[in-house]
Image (cartoon, rainbow, N blue to C red):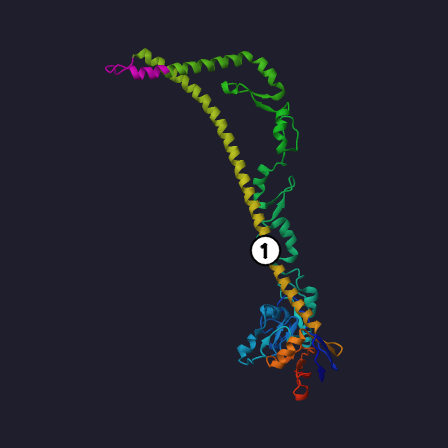
């Protein structure tokens, strides 16, 4: 077929009567490898095994070399591009151009799929008596068997599917709970520590008997509750009474003389202590060198003063004990807050891991999208009605290159694709007839 040259872009229409046009292989839709061998209720034959995972074929695809693969295994192998068939290499039957795994040459082996799905199957899980075919196993039983062992995400124990809900709610030692008061999430072993710091934990006032007072509001209640008992304001000078808030003024009025007496004793002791310290310091500095022993009356007086100091020291020790108890209480609270902080850090790490898993999933989706875009691109130039339109861009330049002999021929995309037959395409070149060598081109359909 000859076409007259034109200086501008030329569109050429090639009509080819194609009786049958075969589509590309079906979608690699499943995301699981082959079925485990122990589900087969009959003798296992080698033709039912995947050449990659060595399990029973699931959604089998056949490569052009004849080996069968699960659709998931084939997709995994060719995810980074066409690969050599490992089975051909192992069997030492590798053929260049034939033993290549690629999406365009593989096709769904429906005959093998029907054979596999009709095989008898049993459930491999201990205690399950289910029987049927592999097709029934995949459609209604796989992943739903109540006797299937799955790993608890918290404690990593293997638990039956029908026991998992009870395990998560009652038995798992690492299960997460929501505090019924503050609704915060925490692990079961931390429940006691959390109760010590939970701001919503209900407390009971020992004075008025009121219950369910949130911890965060309990101190305000203690200050305002008239029945709550607190140490007398004069406890630092020796008053040991525990007085209700509403009776505090009454107690101070009733025992004003006692409080003043204790206060006077305290001040006098302070004064005596200062004088004694001064005298002791002065005596130690001015003791004569020849006096090795103090006078007995002076020694008795010093002993009395020391005894008084001992009594006052006991009072101050009691004050220090109270402060120590307060420090211990604060230390316990700090430790509980630290445990809560560690729990929060674990939660952050768990969420970060989920984000990384989602990123990997998005990456796999991108591969699928790229595959679909390639299929769409191939479909755009594929003829389904016997008519193929080939548009040659920049025709004038390509014509000059053909005349000069630099590029004497051009090839069209494959316009007919077949699984068992060669693909067809068109080659255009300058006519070999001298009279038309500068004004005509030749068109040839080739494999």
Q: Is residue 283 magenta?
A: yes
Left or right, 128 with respect to 280, comes to right
**Residue 17 location in percent, x, y?**
75, 82
Magenta highlight range: 278-294
What residue appears at the point 71 percent right and 84 percent down from the top-left corner? Answer: 2
Establish if 7 lies above or below 342: below
- The quarter of the picture where the N terminus appears is bottom right
Q: Residues within 10 Å of mark 1 (few under 14, many from 20)?
A: few
According to the picture, the residue beneath numbered tag 1 turns out to be 356
Left or right, 236 with respect to 251, comes to left
**Residue 202 visible somewhere in the drawing:** yes
- Residue 31, quarter of the rendered image: bottom right
What residue appears at the point 60 percent right and 57 percent down from the top-left corner? Answer: 357
- Residue 21, quarter of the rendered image: bottom right
| Label 1: which secondary element | helix
**Residue 8 location in percent, x, y?**
70, 75
What residue appears at the point 65 percent right and 73 percent down from the top-left corner? Answer: 60
Number of callouts: 1
User: Which residue is the extreme one toward the right?
Assistant: 385
Establish if 202 lies above or below 397: above
């Amino acid at each position: 077929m000859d076409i007259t040259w034109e200086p501008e872009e030329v569109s050429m229409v090639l009509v080819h009567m194609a009786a049958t046009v075969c589509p590309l292989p079906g979608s690699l839709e499943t995301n699981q490898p082959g079925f485990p061998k122990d589900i087969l209720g009959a003798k296992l034959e080698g033709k039912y095994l995947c050449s990659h995972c060595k399990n029973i074929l699931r959604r089998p695809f056949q490569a052009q070399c004849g080996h069968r693969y699960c659709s998931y295994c084939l997709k995994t192998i060719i995810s980074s591009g066409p690969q050599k068939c490992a089975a051909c290499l192992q069997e030492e039957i590798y053929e260049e151009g034939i033993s290549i795994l690629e999406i365009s040459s593989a096709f769904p082996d429906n005959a093998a799929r029907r054979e596999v799905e009709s095989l008898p199957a049993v459930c491999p899980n201990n205690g399950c008596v289910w029987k049927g075919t592999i097709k029934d196993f995949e459609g209604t039983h796989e992943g739903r068997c109540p006797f299937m062992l799955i790993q608890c995400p918290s404690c990593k124990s293997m638990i039956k599917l029908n026991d998992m809900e009870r395990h998560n709610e009652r038995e798992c030692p690492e299960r997460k709970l929501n505090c019924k008061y503050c609704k915060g999430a925490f692990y079961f072993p931390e429940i006691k520590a959390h109760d010590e710091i939970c701001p919503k934990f209900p407390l009971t006032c020992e004075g008025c008997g009121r219950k369910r007072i949130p911890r965060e509001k309990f101190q305000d209640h203690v200050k305002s509750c008239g029945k709550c008992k607190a140490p007398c304001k004069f406890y630092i000078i020796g008053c040991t009474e525990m007085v209700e808030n509403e009776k505090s003024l009454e107690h101070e009025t009733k025992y004003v003389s006692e409080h003043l007496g204790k206060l006077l004793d305290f001040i006098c002791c302070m004064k005596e202590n200062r004088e004694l310290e001064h005298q002791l310091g002065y005596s130690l500095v001015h003791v004569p060198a020849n006096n090795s022993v103090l006078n007995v009356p002076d020694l008795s007086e010093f002993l009395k003063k020391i005894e008084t100091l001992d009594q006052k020291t006991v009072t101050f020790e009691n004050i220090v004990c109270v402060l120590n108890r307060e420090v211990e209480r604060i230390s316990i609270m700090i430790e509980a807050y630290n445990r809560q902080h560690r729990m929060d850090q674990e939660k952050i790490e768990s969420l970060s891991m989920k984000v990384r898993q989602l990123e990997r999933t998005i990456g796999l989706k991108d591969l699928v999208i790229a595959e679909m875009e390639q299929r769409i691109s191939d479909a755009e130039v594929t003829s389904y009605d016997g008519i193929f339109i080939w548009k040659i861009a920049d025709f004038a330049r390509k014509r000059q290159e053909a005349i000069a002999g630099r590029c004497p021929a051009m090839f069209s995309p494959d316009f007919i694709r077949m699984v068992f037959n060669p693909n067809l395409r068109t080659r255009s070149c300058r006519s070999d007839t001298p009279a038309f060598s500068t004004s005509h081109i030749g068109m040839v359909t080739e494999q």
